[in-house]
Amino acid sequence: MLVPYYEYGKQPSYLVTGGYVFQKLTRNYFALWGDNWSGKVPPHLYQYYSNQAFNPTDERQDIVILSYVLPAPINQGYQDLGRLVVSTWNGMKIRSFEDILKARQLNPDDPFEVIEFELNAPKVVIPRQNIVQYDAQIGQIYGITSLKNI
């Protein structure tokens, strides 16, 4: 399924980098809006669930979203972003959650990772310098023992 209904016995897929929290769009994510969530969730996300949930294609196996931004100096000015569908990462089209790992390896000499989203949302530019240290600090501050589950 493009938007899984339930993933029993499986930890959710996620990645936290630079304080940006990326995950697969699932029905469980929609449940965060409480009962009768279908009228409360952002329409651009709901359309994937209502119109395309059963239609994964070669072009798109998962819907990867930036769900939230954990405030930190590295993401200053981007803290209000969230609930955005990832379109490209370092110029690579994101078809599945696993594509993020490949995309992060692209352009290793570039000083930034660049993430683009649907709906003409602003690009996210993450400086690669010291990202390991920032990620460790963010994990410690927010109590995140593992910054990824892919």
Image: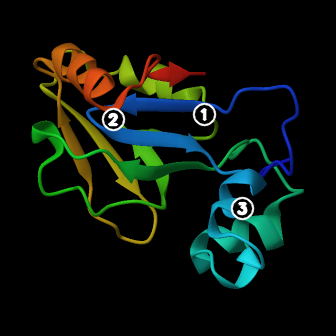
Marks 2, 3: nearer the viewer: 3
Looking at the picture, tell me which residue is in the foreground, 2 or 73.
73
> Of helix, strand and loop, which one carries label 3?
helix
In which quadrant will I find the C terminus? top right
For this rendering, which residue is in front, 132 or 94?
A: 132
Residue in the image at 77% along x and 79% along y: 36
Identify the residue position indicated by label 2 in the image: 90
Q: Earlier in the sequence, mark 1 or mark 2?
A: 2
Q: What residue is drawn where x is 82% and y is 48%?
A: 4
Mark 1: which secondary structure? loop
The residue under label 1 is 97
Amino acid type, residue under disc 2 in the picture = Asn
Q: Residues within 10 Å of mark 3 (few under 14, many from 20)?
A: some
Distance between the alpha carbons at the discs numbered 1 and 2: 14 Å
Q: Residues within 10 Å of mark 2 (few under 14, many from 20)?
A: many
In the image, is 12 to the left or to the right of 55?
Answer: left
Residue 59 percent location from the top left of the image: 69, 46
Q: Amino acid at mark 1?
A: Phe
Q: Nearer the viewer, mark 1 or mark 2?
A: 1
> Depth check: 91 or 9 in front?
9
Q: Residue furthest bottom?
A: 39
